[in-house]
Image: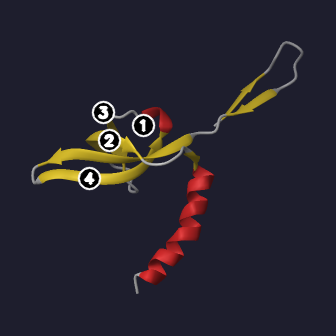
Amino acid sequence: MVLAGVPSDGTEIRRVVIMEYVQCRLTRKVSQGIEVRVSWIPSEYAVEGSTIRLRDAAGSWSDGWRVGNTLGPRMTRDQIDSIRRTELPSIVQRGR
């Protein structure tokens, strides 16, 4: 997200806000028991014990996810994508 403003002298000031994510253990009650998921969520929502909504890859929302413990440091989207690119191929190869 980029925020822009114009001070009184007419010059433009731009400030870049970098969103950080935290990997969290999430649970929710379902008719068969408890569904568990580990997901990267925005750090502002990563409050242990809070309840959040998640959006899947298709854009559908699911309610009732309870935030459990956080796993590891805060990271930007670019850092997460970089980790996924470097680790995924080795995981796939080990699974053969």
The residue under the point 54% across, 43% down is: 74
Q: Give residue 37's position: percent from left, percent from top.
A: 31, 53
Residue under label 4, please give it: 36
Please give left or right for residue 76 compared with residue 44 in the image: right
- The reply to whether discs 3 and 1 touch (Cβ–Cβ < 8 Å) is no
Residue under label 1, please give it: 46
Q: Is residue 6 above or below residue 8?
A: below
Earlier residue among tags 1 and 4: 4
The residue under the point 47% across, 83% down is: 93
Q: CA–CA distance between discs 1 and 4? A: 16 Å
Residue under label 2, please give it: 68
**If the image is split into quadrants, where does the N terminus sit?**
top right
Q: Residue furthest left?
A: 31
Circle 3 Cα neighbour tier, 10 Å, few/some/many (<14 / 14–19 / ≥20): few
Earlier residue among tags 2 and 1: 1
Residue 49: mark: 3
Specify the amino acid type for callout 4: Val
Q: Is residue 43 above or below residue 34?
A: above
Earlier residue among tags 2 and 3: 3
The residue under the point 22% across, 45% down is: 28
